[in-house]
Amino acid sequence: MFSNLILRNSRRNRKENGLFFGSLVISIVAFYILLSLSGQDVMGFLMKMESDAVNRLLTRIPVFYGMTLVILFFLMYFACKYQLERRRKEFGVYLMMGMRRSKLFTMLLAEDLLISVLALIIGLPIAVLLSEIISLVTAKVVGMGIVGHRFTLPLSAVGYTVAGFLAIKFVAFLILSGKISSREIGSLLANTSENEKKQKPAAVYAICILCGIVMLAVAYTMAIQGMVWYDLRAMLATLLLGLWGTILLFYGMRVLIALLVKAGKENRKLHVFTLRQIQENVIHQSTSMAISSLLILAALCCFGAGIGIAGTNRQSGDHVLDYTFQDYRTEPRREFLPYLQAVLEENGLDAQFSHLLEMRIGHVRTLDDSYDVFQMDPVMESLRNLPQSEDRDMLLLYDMSYASYPYLISLSDYNRLLEAVGKSPLTLTANEAAVYRDSDFTTRTALLNGILEEHPKATLRGDELYLRGEIQSMNLVTDRSITLSFALILPDEQFLHYTQGDYSVYINGILSSEATEGRSLLTAISALNEQLDAIGLKDIGIEYESYLQNMGRQLFYMVAASYITIYLAIIFLVVANTVMGVQFLMNQQKTGRRYLTLVRLGATYETICNSAGKQIVWFMGLPVFVAAVSSHFGVKALYTGILSSQAQGTQGEMLMVSAAMIFLLCVVEYIYVTVIKRSSDRYLLTLMQPQREE
């Protein structure tokens, strides 16, 4: 009998609280996917290339796990509170019929345990399946044909998922059920008050909404202009303005709803009642609505950040070089290329490369170690005379700020690199130089190219020099961590003169068709890496970086960004929507006597449900709308701070992707609204036959 009661109550709770049960399942899926990250195919691949970075990422997983536990604890506490408050009269009846408080507590614990176990039974298989799909899709996207997919089921991830979920669920239940089971029978059976709040004059709300709009406008301006990234104080100021601006906006939104009440058509069924309910919801729950809106905004920004970083790595320049070798022992430096060729030939690896290209890079050497050796006043003056624009300002303030002490590149070495990829070589006279900027800094080259067409005059260590366009941006080495924001390509004689023979030498290798015949590029590089390690290059002072290692570094940033940000976005969305849904249902229950009055006055079930549906759309739609508008500025600000200069030029395309994320959010919100409407309709159905109140 007792067990049947538990099963029946548990089944009823799942049906009546589908929103909360769905949130539990999503939380379990998110937990497992985060904890199983180390078992992903792509992470196993990255461990070979970027083991230190991957290990640092994996050591931070417990931090995200702990943070999520705290966030979801409050979610479960709040949702469980609604469940128990909704059933308090039922508990009062149990106690009146003689059920002991300890038995009531046991019944509630058993019901909660059943729901939790069922959520785990449903959530874990979904989580494992999604994890495998994500692993396969990620491997496909990044081109990891060399890594054979294998099914993994990390028991530690399963264990921590189950333990963490049950722990926070049990603690939340323990606190709430203790409060419920200790309450007096009279308080359980009594109707709850509607917690009326004292209303303030309309002018107060109008001032609040105006102040909120002003604060948000200032925060948006600071975010778009990139001021948020200047220093910690600017970032803190922007965040505080956005936070308080959103809170004041929702607090003062009562004025707008009051105007809608006055402008509404009087012949609409329950029109005034509906908008009055919406107005009171905004007043009573304005802070929580603002926080929910900020959580949705954070979710959208997380999506945008992940997409932006992934887009940066996808657009990291054309692949040309497969290897870069460097030797810190061989002197003089010009002997490094013959030495490397001899080592490769001795070990039968010389046929693996179609080209071995020397690349000499150095600095201007001066007697007084001055860092102000290059001036190009005509170029800077031409930039200042251009029409004011963001690109011009960025060039003046940031991009050209390192031009006074440029790197120098040997012309013959750069020309051999151009010829290797089928491009025409450069021709420079003794007093000419070409400007080089790495592909990561080529967003605003159009402005500079227009100026360089005039062959402006510059001075290098006091000597006159004429700059020639266009700007060059071919990758100098395989290692993408070596990026030059500004450099000069000089004829060899001038290069040796200004560097005084003190420069770095890199040997770039391009694989031959023999090395890649019958297999993919990654397979060929992986196999050659094993051969190079076997002959002990490091033992003789030669270090190398392959395209595979460079690709691994890019993949690490892409995977870390996409996994973590999407994970956080899901958590924020689940929390925000569940909190809003539960709050509306709690508020609806507290104002249940108003709906009973409508029933007595002859309102039909369909009319009341239609009114409640409109309230839900407004209550959920307002935070989502504000978040969607704010996300445009938030995502743009994130792109300004996290994207490379090269990727800055593709912001428009990335913002279109973010717009698609907003549309996806609308689909998610529609699902949540539908679930909440069904819960509301079920509750209203119980009021259609009012019971006599004693």
Image (cartoon, rainbow, N blue to C red):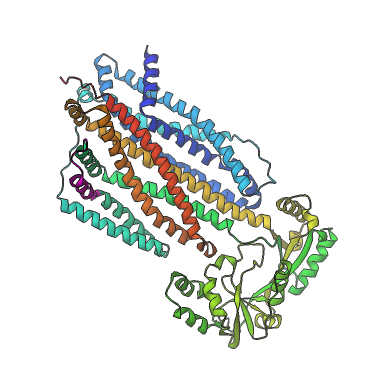
Percent of width and height locating residue 408: 63, 76
Instruction: Kindly identify the residue that appears in the image at 20 percent across and 50 percent down.
Output: 255
The image quadrant that residue 14 belongs to is top left
Q: Residue furthest bottom?
A: 463
Total numbered badges shown on the rendered structure: 0
Instruction: Kindly identify the residue that appears in the image at 29 percent across and 55 percent down.
Output: 245
Instruction: Kindly identify the residue that appears in the image at 28 percent across and 46 percent down.
Output: 287
Comparing 88 with 302, the one in front is 302
Is residue 228 in view from this perspective? yes
Percent of width and height locating residue 491: 69, 81
Q: Is residue 256 magenta?
A: yes
Q: Is residue 609 left or right of residue 319?
A: left
What residue span does the magenta drawing correspond to?
A: 251-269
- Quadrant, the N terminus: top left
Check the image and report above or below for 609 versus 256. above
Q: Is residue 451 magenta?
A: no
Q: Residue furthest front?
A: 267
Check the image and report above or below for 483 versus 569. below
- Quadrant, the C terminus: top left
Percent of width and height locating residue 579: 34, 39
Comparing 277 with 337, the one in front is 277
Q: Is residue 90 left or right of residue 204?
A: right
Instruction: Kindly identify the residue that appears in the image at 48 percent across and 60 percent down.
Output: 651
Percent of width and height locating residue 518: 78, 50
The image quadrant that residue 418 belongs to is bottom right
Is residue 70 in view from this perspective? no
